[in-house]
Image (tube, rainbow, N blue to C red):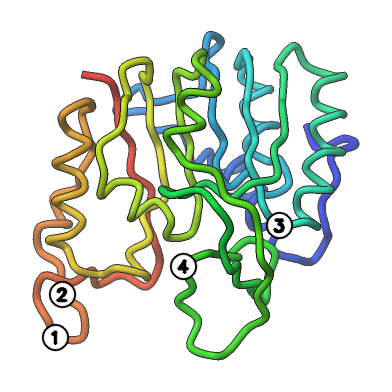
């Protein structure tokens, strides 16, 4: 599967490959949540195209890949060209960060290849660059054939899910929720309640009994988590 797929060895690119390809992070058997042949995906936070490769191996129809960081984007373009030549799946690439408001933003460059963010949680000062952003709603309008969404956008999903959106054509939504940027569980539940107007949202029982550093009602984990949503 990784033949001719470009990635930076001995970097966190390998973590992304392990998470998406080996562990199939975007599949959940008990929900029948999976990439399928009629899917047209938004890949927000496309990195170097690992999800696009995974979707292609599952026979997805198309993936719209959005990635703002220049080095990642250059590799993404090369991998998309390879995938388009090898699989029936079509990948299209766009160099934007996905957020709620569009415009431009100050983008923190993380000390790895996969945690760059408009919403940084790093305590030490890190370099930043100005990047172009695109409104989440503009993507939904620009690509009316979308029927599935994957977001791994390092905290920008929080503001997006604070707002209403037209999910009428979306059958599946999966995203990494950035608890490391907002640990308050009340905020999480408010966002999930808004999504539950459109989807069945898979909320684990343990989410209702969280504690962080002795404070109840705060996410107690050390990492973010993936949330799966299916059309009602």
Q: Secondary structure at mark 3?
A: loop
Mark whose residue sits in front, 2 or 4: 4
The N terminus, quarter of image: top right
> Residue 214, which numbered label?
1
- The x, y position of residue 55, in whole percent, is 62, 26
Contact between marks 3 and 1 (CB within 8 A): the answer is no
54 or 136, nearer to the observer: 136
Q: Secondary structure at mark 1?
A: loop
Mark whose residue sits in front, 1 or 4: 4
Q: Can you tell which quarter of the image residue 142 is in?
A: top right
- Counting residues from the start of the chain, the first of labels 2 and 4 encountered is 4
User: Is the residue marked by circle 4 packed among few (<14), some (14-19), or many (20+) residues within 10 Å?
Assistant: some
Mark whose residue sits in front, 3 or 1: 3
Q: CA distance from mark 2 to mark 1?
A: 6 Å
Q: Can you tell which quarter of the image residue 85 is in?
A: top right
Q: CA distance from mark 1 to mark 4?
A: 25 Å
Q: CA distance from mark 3 to mark 1?
A: 37 Å
The C terminus, quarter of image: top left
- Counting residues from the start of the chain, the first of labels 1 and 4 encountered is 4
Q: Which residue is mark 2?
A: 211
- Counting residues from the start of the chain, the first of labels 3 and 1 encountered is 3
Horizontally, residue 189 falls left or right of residue 53, namely left
- The x, y position of residue 40, in whole percent, is 55, 18
Report how many numbered discs are placed on residues in the image.
4
Contact between marks 2 and 1 (CB within 8 A): the answer is yes
Q: Is residue 115 above or below residue 126?
A: above
**Residue at image point 42% right, 60% down:** 155
Q: Is residue 102 above or below residue 196?
A: below
User: Is the residue marked by circle 3 packed among few (<14), some (14-19), or many (20+) residues within 10 Å?
Assistant: many
Q: Secondary structure at mark 4?
A: loop
Q: Which residue is mark 4?
A: 119
User: Is the residue marked by circle 2 packed among few (<14), some (14-19), or many (20+) residues within 10 Å?
Assistant: some
């Amino acid at each position: 599967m990784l033949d001719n797929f470009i990635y930076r060895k001995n970097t966190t690119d390998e973590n992304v490959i392990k998470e998406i390809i080996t562990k199939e992070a975007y599949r959940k058997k008990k929900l029948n949540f999976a990439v399928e042949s009629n899917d047209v995906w938004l890949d927000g936070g496309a990195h170097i195209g690992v999800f696009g490769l995974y979707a292609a191996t599952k026979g997805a129809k198309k993936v719209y890949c959005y990635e703002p960081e220049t080095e990642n984007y250059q590799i993404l373009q090369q991998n998309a060209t390879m995938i388009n030549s090898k699989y029936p799946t079509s990948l299209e690439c766009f160099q934007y960060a996905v957020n709620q408001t569009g415009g431009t933003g100050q983008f923190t460059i993380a000390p790895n290849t996969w945690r760059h963010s408009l919403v940084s949680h790093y305590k030490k000062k890190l370099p930043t660059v100005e990047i172009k952003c695109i409104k989440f709603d503009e993507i939904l309008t620009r690509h009316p054939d979308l029927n599935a969404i994957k977001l791994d956008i390092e905290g920008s999903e929080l503001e997006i899910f604070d707002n209403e959106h037209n999910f009428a054509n979306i059958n599946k939504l999966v995203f990494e929720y950035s608890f490391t940027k907002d640990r308050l569980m009340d905020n999480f539940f408010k966002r999930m309640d808004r999504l539950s107007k459109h989807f069945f949202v898979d909320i684990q029982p343990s989410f209702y009994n969280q504690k962080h550093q002795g404070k109840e009602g705060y996410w107690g984990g050390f990492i973010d988590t993936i949330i799966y949503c299916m059309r009602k």
